[in-house]
Image (cartoon, helix red, strand yellow):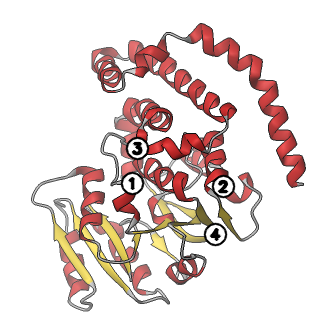
Amino acid sequence: MISICIPTYNGSKYLEACLQSVYAQTFTDFEIIICDDCSSDNTIEIVKAFQEKDSRIKLSVNEKNLGLVGNWNRCLEIAQGEWIKFVFQDDLISVNCLKQMLSVATGKTQLVLSEREFIFEEDVTDEIKKTYNEVGRLYDLADIDKVRHFSKRETCDLINKYIPANFLGEPTSVLFRKSVVNEVGVFNSEVNQHCDLEYWIRIISVHGFVYISDKLVSFRVHNSSTTQKNNSQKYFSSFYADRIIVVYLLLFDPIYKEFRKNSSLFGLFGLRYSLFYFIYHAEVFAKKNGEAVQKEMQLLKEKYPKVKELQNQYFFYAPLNITIRPFRKLIAFTKNKKKG
């Protein structure tokens, strides 16, 4: 059974279309977990109307607002299925989404990822559209035709090369086993914008993953979405702090020891340089944007002590990165030539 998890918060505008796309699935052995985070619109009424027609819907309303990550983790607590499939309240899934994702999973598969398409609402600017349309697709980045099983070593190479860019996709693109939660834990509430990306790489750096190049899900982009609100209202935390935290965890946290074990020295150095780069520019941004942002930067240093240490290593990392860059390019060229 699949647990389809739909975390909701004031999602009435698109929720009905989302649920209709779930009901249209050709694979029908699923439960629908809806965790509502104290909505003030008619989200609950919409869910209850669907609930009257289908007993597979389980509605849980939080006693207090848990926030985005807290509500995702509440979904994980309630889910009873062997597999978990997040479908966000404003997204859609194609009729064969569940069937096709399950069909490529083997007994060892812990996570399946499908490609996605974007639905742009009228309030979305051309600049934002351009940003999304320029997102790297795995079928381009890794030369994939249809379906590919990535080993954990191949996965670690991808992470080293593309992090902190979200080369995987949004939560609606992913299907993963419930049992892996016991191994890697739940979503990290310290990460604001990239909490999904950090969770996926926590899983796939240990187990690898299966990728489907078909666009089985649709991610809706509109100005009232959480992503857009985070980008506009919490720029420092969503842009700088998130990148610093994700790369920091990859380099130093015990949960990522397998990732470091399966990464090349060049890959890990590239990550350290990226971390230094983000810290340096975060500090510059904080100094230009007032006391509140400077306080955020200070709290980040206190929480992650090596941030302060790396901040003072410009004269080590900058020249060294310039020195080894040609060798990294040569290695990448050699690998691509062998694949060709």
3D distance between C-alphas at marks 3 and 1: 19 Å
Residue lying farthest to the left in this orientation:
63
Q: Nearer the viewer, mark 2 or mark 4?
A: 4
Residue 67's x, y, as percent?
Answer: 24, 50
Residue carrying label 1: 184
Residue carrying label 4: 212
Name the kind of residue labelled 4 in the image.
Ile
Look at the picture and state if 32 lies above or below 313. Answer: below
Chain-order first, disc 3 or disc 4: 3
Chain-order first, disc 3 or disc 2: 2
Residue 42's x, y, as percent?
Answer: 19, 69
Left of 41 or right of it: where is 27? right
User: Is disc 2 placed on a helix, strand or loop?
Assistant: loop
Residue lying farthest to the top in this orientation:
315
Residue carrying label 2: 137
Residue 272's x, y, as percent?
Answer: 57, 26
Circles 2 and 4: CB atoms closer than 8 Å: no
User: Is disc 4 placed on a helix, strand or loop?
Assistant: strand
Q: Nearer the viewer, mark 2 or mark 1?
A: 1
